[in-house]
Image (cartoon, grey):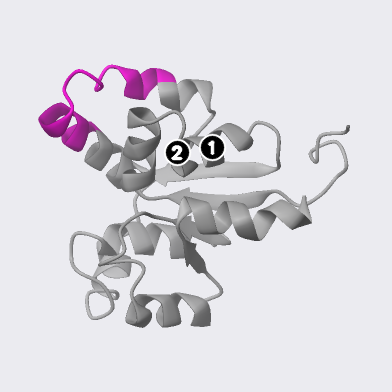
Amino acid sequence: MQNSKSEGKKRIKIFLDSSVIIAAILSPIGGSFRLIRESFFKNYALLISEYVLDECIRTLKIKFPMKANILPLFLTNFNFKILRDPTQKEVENLIEIINFQDAPVLAGALKYKVEYLISLDKKDFLNQKVLEFARKKGLSILTPKEFLQAESPKM
């Protein structure tokens, strides 16, 4: 079976929230890990911003210190692309849409024109207001499970 990269298909750009990366590190059998693992076999470009990386480091050090040393290996082995943060203005433009702490993540996904923002944060990302705003901008916000279910038949 040919890999989709060799078939010349467009690469699917996926921006990950820190919740997905942390969940993948904590559970190698969950949807978050499965999505990241499948990026090897499917044409997914895994993108994060410096802000998301810092959030992962901070959360792992505080809540899961025994797992914090896995992050650098994880990012390298799964070929994540770490992008520059959006500008302060790009973040400020979203304060009325999403809370201040999550605005840099949404701004990053919009700045880099990704097709998908994947998050486990139901309260802040997966609420009606944010989902409608993102949809109008051409961005789908999904959980890892929703993404995998939506993409399975296409691959």
Mark 2 residue element: loop
The image quadrant of residue 39 is: top right
Give me the residue at 51% from left, 82% from top: 136
Q: Is residue 63 magenta?
A: yes
Q: Which mark is residue 30?
A: 2
Judging depth in this view, the residue of 99 and 119 nearest the camera is: 119
Q: Which residue matches tag 1?
A: 34
Q: Main secondary structure of the magenta part?
A: helix
Give the image location of residue 25, x and y in percent: 36, 29
* Mark 1 surroundings: few (<14), some (14-19) or many (≥20) residues within 10 A: some
Label pair 2/1, CB-CB below 8 angstroms: yes
| Magenta residues, start to end | 57-73
Q: In the picture shown, does residue 144 fall above or below 131?
A: above
Give me the residue at 47% from left, 35% from top: 33
Give the image location of residue 47, x and y in percent: 49, 44
The quarter in which the N terminus is drawn is top right
Q: In the picture shown, does residue 99 fall above or below 73?
A: below
